[in-house]
């Protein structure tokens, strides 16, 4: 019997914030397509997926994903955002979902991580995972800052090992750091690793230790020794 997304991905449509009835069918189609894409690479894990209406999204796309643990993720949708409807037609939902699914897969293995270095690599791996599965270009936040500029923000190795780093500053652009710095840096670090190692197995894409990938960044001058 053919496995469908409804057999292992349990969708929970949240209604207290207004609901998504008008878009539910289209979103479900996008989820199914993401599931079929993932099946070409690995066996999709069992997941609970929360789907809700919220203004708390990435403004440029009107969607926001979040992984909570190895079996739970959420997608927020903002129909009032003028950028939202186009994203239902250009595979954005699929890419956001697969990004979060990768986080769940990694959480079932080495974990997302508690340090800056681990977070950079978890985000970079998720981005390249989607790029590899769907043959799509980087998302805007993954190429917001050029490699040349990234070098001006290269963190010292000691900071990468810190678990007291400011996640909002590094990834969302608060304090003195530019918006999406962490996403762009993580994506570039994983690009360097991917270019040399040519990963192709589930274990490589999901379970590679952050330290192994960070070493490529240090060699390239993106990390201070």
Image (cartoon, rainbow, N blue to C red):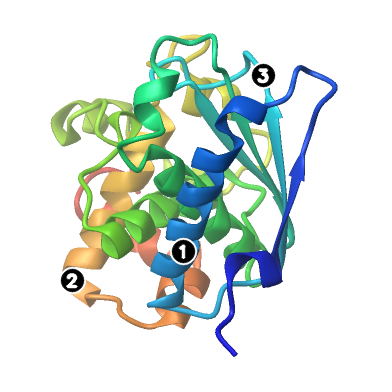
Q: Which mark is residue 5?
A: none
Front: mark 2 or 3:
3
Using the rendered image of the protein, determine whether residue 159 is visible from the camera's viewpoint. Answer: no
Q: Separation of disc 1 and disc 2 at Cα?
A: 15 Å
Q: Which mark is residue 196?
A: 2
Image quadrant assignment for residue 18: top right
List x then y, in percent, for residue 113.
Answer: 63, 54
Residues tagged 1 and 2 counted as in contact (Cβ below 8 A): no
Q: Can you identify the residue that label 3 sits on?
A: 54
On screen, residue 127 versus residue 192, left or right, reads right
**Residue lying at 28% horizontally and 63% vertically, measured from the top left:** 132
List x then y, in percent, for residue 4.
Answer: 58, 72
List x then y, in percent, for residue 174.
Answer: 52, 12
Q: Which badge, 1 or 3, is on the more N-terminal residue?
A: 3
Q: Can you identify the residue that label 1 sits on?
A: 211
**Residue lying at 24% horizontally and 55% vertically, measured from the top left:** 191
Residues tagged 2 and 3 counted as in contact (Cβ below 8 A): no
Q: Secondary structure at mark 3?
A: loop
Q: Which badge, 1 or 2, is on the more N-terminal residue?
A: 2
Label 2 neighbour load within 10 Å: few <14, some 14-19, many 20+:
few
Front: mark 1 or 3:
3
Label 1 neighbour load within 10 Å: few <14, some 14-19, many 20+:
some
User: Is 1 rendered above or below residue 16?
Assistant: below
């Amino acid at each position: 019997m053919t496995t469908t997304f409804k057999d292992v991905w349990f969708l929970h449509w949240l209604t207290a914030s207004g609901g998504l009835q008008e878009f539910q069918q289209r979103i479900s189609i996008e989820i199914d397509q993401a599931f079929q894409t993932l099946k070409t690479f690995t066996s999709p894990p069992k997941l609970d997926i929360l789907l809700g209406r919220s203004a708390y999204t990435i403004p440029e796309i009107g969607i926001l994903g979040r992984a909570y643990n190895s079996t739970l993720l959420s997608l927020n949708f903002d129909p009032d955002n003028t950028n939202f409807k186009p994203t239902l037609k250009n595979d954005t939902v699929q890419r956001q979902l697969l990004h979060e699914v990768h986080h769940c897969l990694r959480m079932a293995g080495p974990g997302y991580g508690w340090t800056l270095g681990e977070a950079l690599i978890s985000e970079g791996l998720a981005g390249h995972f989607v790029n590899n599965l769907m043959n799509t270009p980087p998302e805007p936040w993954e190429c917001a800052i050029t490699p040349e500029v990234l070098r001006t923000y290269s963190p010292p190795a000691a900071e990468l090992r810190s678990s007291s780093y400011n996640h909002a500053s590094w990834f969302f652009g608060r304090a003195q750091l530019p918006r999406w710095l962490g996403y762009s840096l993580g994506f570039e670090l994983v690009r360097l690793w991917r270019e040399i190692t040519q990963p192709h197995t589930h274990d490589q894409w999901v379970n590679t230790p952050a330290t192994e990938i960070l070493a490529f960044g240090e060699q390239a001058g993106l990390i201070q020794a």
